[in-house]
């Protein structure tokens, strides 16, 4: 039982680590016109050989510095032997220290260059690929001339490898040759396969050797063989369409990797899972590398790739986690019923990836018709008062979706009023002021918060005013009249006082004039009125009018606009109306539950207060008598079918947006369940199934084992053959 659970745990860990490893994007770290040739890691430090330089990195390939430099040579091989750094160049093998001292210890003579270099045991081997091999034991030799070895019948060498202190050579005849000392002769394997060429990428796991080979149809495969076996076999998993293997890493625990070209196209990195299937590792390599040269799996499990670049001659790429975009949905909004609301979101990607899609979602109970929900700017016109919640998302070109940014829109009912001015002479005009008293309601002129001409004080009530057309009105002639809106409430509105900015005429010779201010409703009824004498002033002045206390009935007036002012737009989330100019956004805490339905509407009982129930989509007292409209009537959502909702006493079909499903008579997103992402729910379910399976198998085998023992013991019990008791005859 314990072994079963342990195996299940190991499988889950490997599967989870595979999922995490796949979620990375290949990013270009450095690039150069010089050739990048090989990668090597020693004790956490990464080295890279290139034209005239050896570079090194101590931060997992994030940044590189020059380790050593020698002009005119190109490093193709790197290693570290007994603390001494060795670099293989076409011109030979060199001992290298970090103060640019290069000491040759093996010359390619009689060849011109070393195309391949390998180290086995304590001996270095080099070849130009044409049958001969130069080798030298150790690096502290007085002569640079090595021994020369040849393999009978081999005229071309396609790869070198090392295993168990032996040098391995792949010949043009598709056999592998190996020896611990070339002077003692060579052993060989059977042919890798008929009609196969370009044997390369030798890997060894125990006594098994793995190679890549090109078939006659141009496709490349992985083959393997036990050293003492004459038969080569295809690797259990092949990469479909692979035409060239630049590098192959076979591991004993099943996690193998390959740097390949698919159908002679761009380079890709593939990973083999424990299920013997290959899948692409990371995304976006083709944007950095066109043809790969070397693949390095670092000790921390991360990968580096070097190769030709589509822009630069060479580039080094690292597979790094992809960061999701960061989004902002703008400031919260307060507006009125019937006014168009504009939502505007912004997104930034720290990786520099392109933002390819946007999405506005509505997690609240009431869904509005949102225009432009798939763009960064969306609009809607609320038809009812309440609180609306919107979540903004962005996705980059590697399909990484952001966390949501939320904006809350508070929609209130309002009453429309008008302010009117009148005077006995034409020597006063209504003009814009140039000061601002924080805490007072004001008229906003074109977005300039210091430019207004009217202020109203209405006790503790919230005031949201439309902009005034402040061109300067002659009070006597034009009798200026401008509208403003005030939040409706059940108690009504009490006007306290108001202020108007007025200016005297230049030729005004009288000491002043009497000015009257009226506040009227849409029917023309006067709700507040005050008059006073205003003295002449060379500059504009604020004049305060105090009204007699009086309540104004609350309500929403469905009147058309009499305004002549133009609405202005905002760069952030805002509210505008075709009939009225721009609304000023109110700031402050939103007391309503942002995820509840608007006003007193509901779709289930949980949306209502204690003692109330959701009836006909409205919260009513549980004591309220309930009647059904007809046979298809309803009083609660549960009275309807699963795909219906209770709409004004009648069951109507519920139509959800694309990507949503119906749960408890409402639409919810498909990408989560019980508040959890579907992939996490799937993982939890898989774990539960595996654990229950393990328990069942353990119980079954335990019963088989112990049940047989009990059965045997029962069978071995001898029956108690008691003799019958004798009785005396009376």
Image (cartoon, rainbow, N blue to C red):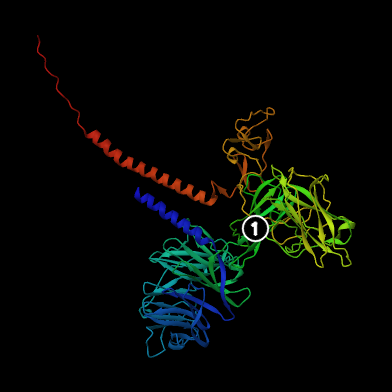
Q: Report which quarter residue 425 is drawn in.
A: bottom right
Q: Mark yes or no: residue 287 visible.
A: yes
**SS for callout 1:** loop
Q: Residue 352 placed where, x, y %?
A: 61, 68
Q: Mark yes or no: residue 151 visible.
A: no
Who's the residue at 39% across and 53% down the image?
Answer: 7
Who's the residue at 88% across and 65% down the image?
Answer: 509
Q: Is residue 37 left or right of residue 658?
A: left
Q: Return the residue nearer the eye: 445 or 328.
A: 445
The residue furthest top is: 730
List the residue tagged with mark 1.
329
Q: Residue 68 placed where, x, y %?
A: 48, 85
Q: Residue 621 placed where, x, y %?
A: 61, 34
Q: Is residue 611 left or right of residue 178?
A: right
Q: Residue 2 placed where, x, y %?
A: 35, 50
Q: Report which quarter residue 550 is drawn in.
A: top right
552 up-or-down from 229: above or below: above
218 up-or-down from 582: above or below: below
Q: How many marks?
A: 1
Quadrant of the image containing the C terminus:
top left
Crowd class of label 1 (few under 14; some 14 to 19; many from 20; radius 10 Å): many
């Amino acid at each position: 039982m314990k072994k079963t659970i342990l195996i299940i745990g190991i499988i889950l860990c490997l599967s989870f680590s595979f999922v995490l490893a796949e979620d990375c994007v290949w990013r270009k770290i450095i690039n150069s016109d010089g050739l990048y040739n090989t990668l090597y890691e020693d004790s956490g430090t990464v080295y890279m050989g290139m034209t005239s330089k050896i570079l090194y990195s101590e931060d997992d390939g994030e940044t590189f510095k020059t380790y050593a430099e020698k002009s005119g040579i190109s490093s193709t091989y790197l290693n570290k032997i007994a603390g001494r750094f060795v670099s293989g160049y076409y011109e030979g093998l060199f001992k290298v220290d970090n103060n640019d001292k290069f000491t040759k210890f093996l010359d390619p003579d009689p060849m011109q260059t070393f195309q391949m270099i390998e180290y086995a045991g304590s001996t270095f081997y080099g070849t130009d690929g044409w049958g001969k091999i130069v080798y030298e034991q150790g690096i502290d030799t007085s002569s640079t001339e090595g021994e020369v070895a040849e393999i009978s019948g081999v005229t071309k060498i396609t790869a070198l490898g090392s295993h168990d202190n032996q040098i391995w050579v792949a010949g043009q005849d598709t056999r592998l040759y190996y020896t611990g000392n070339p002077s003692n002769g060579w052993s060989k394997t059977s042919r890798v396969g008929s009609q196969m060429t370009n044997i390369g990428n030798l890997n060894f796991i125990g006594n098994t050797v793995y190679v890549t080979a090109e078939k006659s149809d141009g496709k490349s495969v992985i083959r393997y063989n036990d050293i003492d076996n004459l038969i080569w076999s295809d690797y259990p998993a092949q990469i479909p369409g692979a035409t060239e293997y630049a590098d192959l890493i076979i591991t004993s625990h099943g996690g193998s990797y390959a740097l390949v070209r698919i159908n002679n196209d761009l380079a890709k990195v593939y990973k083999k899972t424990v299920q013997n299937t290959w899948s692409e590792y990371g995304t976006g390599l083709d944007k950095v590398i066109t043809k790969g040269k070397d693949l390095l799996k670092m000790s921390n499990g991360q990968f580096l790739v070097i190769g030709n670049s589509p822009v630069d001659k060479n580039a080094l790429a690292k597979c790094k986690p992809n960061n999701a975009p960061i989004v902002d949905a703008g400031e919260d909004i307060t507006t009125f019923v019937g006014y168009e609301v504009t939502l505007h979101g912004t997104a930034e990607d720290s990786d520099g990836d392109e933002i390819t899609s946007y999405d506005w979602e509505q997690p609240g109970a009431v869904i509005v018709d949102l225009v432009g929900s798939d763009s960064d700017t969306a609009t809607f016109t609320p038809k009812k008062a309440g609180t609306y919640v919107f979540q903004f998302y962005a996705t980059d070109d590697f399909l990484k979706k952001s966390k949501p940014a939320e904006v809350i829109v508070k929609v209130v009912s309002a009453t429309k009023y008008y302010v009117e001015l009148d005077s006995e002479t034409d020597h006063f005009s209504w003009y814009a002021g140039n000061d601002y008293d924080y805490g007072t309601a004001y008229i906003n002129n074109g977005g300039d918060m210091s430019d207004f001409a009217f202020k109203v004080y209405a006790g503790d009530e919230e005031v949201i005013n439309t902009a005034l057309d402040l061109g300067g009105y002659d009070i006597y002639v034009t009798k200026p009249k401008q509208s403003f809106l005030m939040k409706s409430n059940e108690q009504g509105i009490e006007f306290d006082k108001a202020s108007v900015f007025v200016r005297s005429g230049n030729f005004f010779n009288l000491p002043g004039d009497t000015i009257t201010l009226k506040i009227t409703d849409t029917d023309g009824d006067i709700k507040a009125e005050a008059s006073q004498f205003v003295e002449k002033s060379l500059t504009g002045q604020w004049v305060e009018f105090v009204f007699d206390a009086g309540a104004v009935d609350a309500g929403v007036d469905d009147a058309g606009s009499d305004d002549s002012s133009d609405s202005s737009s905002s760069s952030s989330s805002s509210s505008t109306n075709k009939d009225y100019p721009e609304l000023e956004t109110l700031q402050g805490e939103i007391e309503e539950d942002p995820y509840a339905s608007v006003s007193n509407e509901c779709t289930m009982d949980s949306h209502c207060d204690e003692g109330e129930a959701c009836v006909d989509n409205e919260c009513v007292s549980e004591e309220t008598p309930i009647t059904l409209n007809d046979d298809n009537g309803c009083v609660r959502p549960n009275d309807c079918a699963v795909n219906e909702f209770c709409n004004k006493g009648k069951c109507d079909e519920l139509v959800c947006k694309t990507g949503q499903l119906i749960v408890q008579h409402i639409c919810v997103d498909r990408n989560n369940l019980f508040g959890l992402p579907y992939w996490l729910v799937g993982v939890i379910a898989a774990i539960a199934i595996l654990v229950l399976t393990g328990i069942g198998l353990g119980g079954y085998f335990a019963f088989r084992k112990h049940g047989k023992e009990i059965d045997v013991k029962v069978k071995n019990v001898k029956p108690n053959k008691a003799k019958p008791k004798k009785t005396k005859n009376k």
